[in-house]
Image: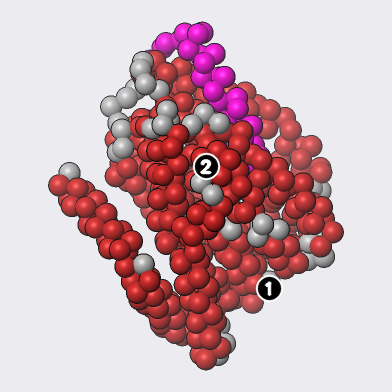
Amino acid sequence: PEDFGIVGIAIALNTFADIIVGYNWGQAIIRSEENVNDVANISFWMMGILSIILYGIFWFLAPAVAAGYKNPFLVTVIRLISLTIIISATSLVPKALMEREFRYQHLFVVRTVSTTLTNIVILIWVFIAPSIWVIVAQPILIAVTQSFTSYYLTKWRPQIYWNWKQAKQIISFNSVIIFATFITWVLIYGDNLFAGALLGATQLGIYVLGWNLALIIPNIVSGSVGQVAYTTFSRFKDEQERVGLQFIHLQRLFSIILFPISAGIAIIAQPLAQIIYGENWGALPTVMMLLSLMTIFTFLWNLNELAFRAIGRPMLGVIAPILLIAYGAPALFMFGRDDVIAYSLTRTLIMVPFPFMVMVVTQYAFGISVLKQMQAIAWPFIITALMFGLGYLCLQAFGPLTNVRHLPQVGLIIIICAAFYGLMMFIFQRPLMLQIRDMFMSNLKRRNAT
């Protein structure tokens, strides 16, 4: 657990750098209506220079951070993982161009190839010589493979080009986005640093692993939907009403997918964590379950922030997060400092009001009433809650599931819950489910054709 805690601190710092040299620069390319190649080249060189500067800053700050957490080993870990700042910056332009051109199948290939190759290397490494270096190497390998794959799948190559007027426009657009993204970082990764300061490296390791296991699938789904959503919203950025209609439609579809995934992970968290990681990780099953439930109140409302950015009002996206930080940080300090379970429970509970705050801001931005927003996601939420109850009853019926021999029972619980959710959705939301089926079949035919 302590190894995961050390790496978690380094990754939290690394993601802070991504705010400055990360995806935000790609959004400027996606929104560009002319001179796209010029914007791409300027963005590439800006990110390259900034990433090198940031790496230098992290190099010199590493000893101070290590001293703050009383772990000298953090110096080496931070300096190694921070290499991903420079490596990732090289692939952002080609990925943004793919997104702009709706080449989502290529983006899928980039993610799949990088994840698959990295996991193969990591598994071999773990088998031969398991150590903390395996965890450190993972983000570096992903960054390298994503960069190579991105350039392989696109014809764009960087050229030496600079224009101060265009550069100032890009910086002006990104400065507001960077502030909004920083607030999001505080909610997600700044939370890891806060947990480390309160709980120590060992309990932070349990929290980080539970966080990663709970969020890995919602992250993938959210990222994929977010790419489509932002590009779609940006196409109609001058038609605010149309963006609002697109937003509410996408949110309804997204909730149908996200809610059952999050609740499903929460259902199987206890047996899965015990089967894979054993008893040495103590509170991990409970932490994973709580954080899985938290994602129900988190990821769906990423769409709101993307819609605000698309219409040129990104500051609207920080109102609810700032309020959340204002009451959430004191709550975590008062109620979450005893142990990792108390911290995870507090973290989940403070997220419950968050969707309602975002809905109020969305009503102000698009004129979509809070009631209409709630109605859009009501049935998926209700049926997901019933599914979670069914899953809990199944777990009680099967008894303790603690080793590999119990995997068939875990699989059966997943099948029962998925079948229940699908059946209920077809009964109460049949037209929408048929629409999702038609969209899936259409995309499948398009991919087969290409």
Residue 426 lies, with reference to residue 76, above or below; the image says below
Residue 41 lies, with reference to residue 25, above or below; the image says above
SS majority, magenta: helix
The answer to whether one can see residue 82 in this image is: no
Q: For the magenta stretch, what is the residue range?
A: 158-186
Q: How many marks?
A: 2
Question: Which part of the image, by quadrant, shows the N terminus?
Answer: bottom right
170 vs 315, left or right, is left
SS at mark 2 in the image: loop
Question: In the rendered image, which residue does mark 2 sit on?
Answer: 367
Q: Residues within 10 Å of mark 1 (few under 14, many from 20)?
A: some
Q: Between residue 219 and residue 8, name the one nearer to us.
A: 219
Question: In the rendered image, which residue does mark 1 sit on?
Answer: 282
Which label's residue is closer to the chain start, 1 or 2? 1
Q: What's the residue at 51%, 19% (across, down)? A: 170
Amino acid of disc 1: Gly
Q: What's the residue at 42%, 18% (across, down)? A: 39
The answer to whether one can see residue 180 in this image is: yes
User: Marks 1 and 2, Cα distance to the nearest angstrom?
Assistant: 48 Å
Q: What's the residue at 31%, 59% (across, down)? A: 436
